[in-house]
DNA sequence: CAAGCAAAACAAATCAGATTTAATATTCGG
DNA sequence: CCGAATATTAAATCTGATTTGTTTTGCTTG
């Protein structure tokens, strides 16, 4: 899982993360968090001073923010912060910034709804396109889920769950669905960490994952989609009855 | 419909489209089309010369391409073109470039699969969130579809169809689904223009759109989702039997 | 000859200053 | 009061210099 979602946060071996990307990250978070509300106008030379860098660095950061729909640079005016309606809400960095800010709940909700539509289709497609290796990974992930469900290791259970879903999306053979592997992983993590989640994963959920893997392996798209739909329905139920 | 998809192509009142965005567009298309295959290395000063602009302009364009995952700038090496597996495939410009290039078929297929998952969920959500105005727009669009289906004006039919689906996605209240309004419109246009499409739209399709609008208006999410699913199934059938 | 280390070379990254351009505000003439 | 000419503003572009991180080269040493 080459987690693009973490590119701005990850800290490889003490490697300094380029000035421009640090400025980009700072301003981006300010916009997404609402600290810089829509309509706010910034000036380039005001920004270099505040960040202690040269104009070209700020300029490139602003350019990227512009390309993400977060700001708009107009002559004579300055750099204007845009309302969320014009953001590229599928940009991995925008998603990351939203998840890290006050909009986290809303972002998880939106992602969950997208996931609800996307995953059954992905399961159906995977039944037609999954490679033996991918099937193996998915079956292995289900085994891990079963093991950690019994041992009560929620973190390990989550990792296996994420691996299962990311592999399934990749196996769909659709690059757009595959690109959503990371965000679906975020949804799963969000449920485990933040929201109410049974301290012991539901054994039925594990069985349903096995059903998906089996259906995919045998090439039965309809069954794969149905089982995936059941997984999602089970998850909604689990949220409603946290004590179960 | 604020068509972000067209931002690089649209030509407002003779307004020169900024040097940097022209360079961005040119290089972006070359990468996406495969004219610049993955692994190709470019040098900044080679690019200024080729495009007749200054380094700063090229630099900013490269930064944006980098942020889209199309290229990667490394010291000592240059600017390396990345494989499609690292592209931000949900970026509106990447989608547009793919639609305009040799990957058009593949892009339409992928978008169609995404749409298949997304729209039933959007219909269900719209039943809970749609405003009276949005319901009015959708009903009006259905009327237009019926009119133009009989008159045989495929272009006008397409426009009403696009309006219907974009409004539905917006009415879902989910900003990520709403952001897909443009690309769903592209899928519809792609079917009308390129692929095989009955010269007279199927009356059943129009009725199903009416069913969706009605279900949304009455707040019946399940019925809305089912009707939308039927629309998509009908569309697949229409593709398989073009003569009907 | 092989391994390890220092130096050179390379291209991007950053900085700094000047000039150009487009949009807005202001002023002036009617 | 209105429209055209003008001034102003800040981004856009250009240019050259400097810095930094990587890679290769070449030298030294065992």
Image (cartoon, coloured by chain):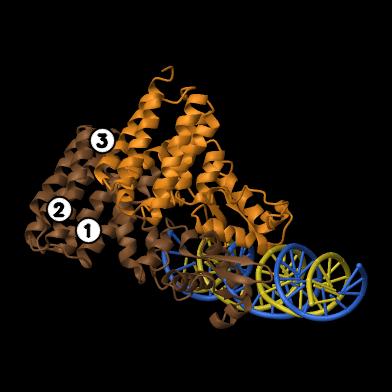
Chain colours: A orange, B brown, C yellow, D blue
Q: What residue is shown with label 2?
A: B144
- Pick the quarter of the image with the N terminus of chain B: bottom left
Give whichever of discs 2 and 3 has the lower sequence position.
3
Tell me which chain the residue with mark 3 is part of. Answer: B
Report if the CB atoms under discs 1 and 2 are less than 8 Å apart: yes
Q: Position of residue A155 (x, y in %)?
A: 55, 32
Left or right: B227 as drawn, with respect to C20: left
The residue carrying pointer 3 sits among few (fewer than 14), some (14 to 19) or many (20 or more) residues within 10 Å by Cα, namely many
Circle 3: element type = helix
Tell me which chain the residue with mark 2 is part of. Answer: B
Seen from the viewer's position, the closer of residues A70 and B62 is B62
Give whichever of discs 3 and 1 has the lower sequence position.
3
| Mark carried by residue B127 | 3
Tell us which disc is closer to us: 3 or 1: 3
Cα distance in 3D space between marks 3 and 1: 23 Å
Q: Position of residue A132 (x, y in %)?
A: 39, 51
Q: Position of residue A243 (x, y in %)?
A: 43, 17
């Amino acid at each position: 899982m080459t987690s693009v979602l973490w590119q701005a946060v990850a800290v490889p071996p003490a490697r300094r993360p380029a000035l421009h990307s640090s400025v980009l990250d700072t301003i981006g978070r300010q916009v997404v968090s609402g600290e810089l509300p829509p309509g706010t106008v910034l000036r380039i030379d005001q920004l270099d001073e505040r960040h202690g860098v040269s104009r070209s660095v700020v300029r490139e950061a602003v350019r990227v923010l512009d390309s993400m729909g977060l700001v708009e640079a107009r002559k004579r005016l300055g750099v204007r912060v845009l309302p969320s309606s014009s953001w590229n809400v599928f940009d991995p960095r925008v998603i990351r910034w939203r998840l890290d800010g006050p909009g986290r709940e809303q972002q998880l909700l939106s992602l969950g709804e997208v996931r609800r539509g996307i995953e059954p289709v992905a399961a159906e497609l995977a039944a037609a396109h999954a490679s033996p290796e991918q099937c193996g990974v998915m079956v292995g992930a289900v085994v891990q889920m079963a093991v950690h469900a019994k041992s009560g290791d929620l973190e390990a259970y989550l990792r296996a769950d994420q691996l299962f879903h990311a592999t399934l999306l990749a196996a769909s053979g659709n690059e757009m669905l595959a690109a959503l592997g990371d965000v679906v992983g975020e949804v799963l993590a969000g449920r485990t960490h933040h929201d109410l989640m049974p301290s012991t994963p539901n054994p039925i959920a594990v069985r349903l994952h096995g059903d998906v893997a089996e259906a995919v392996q045998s090439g039965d798209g309809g069954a794969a989609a149905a089982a995936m739909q059941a997984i999602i329905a089970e998850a909604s139920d689990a949220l409603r009855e946290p004590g179960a």
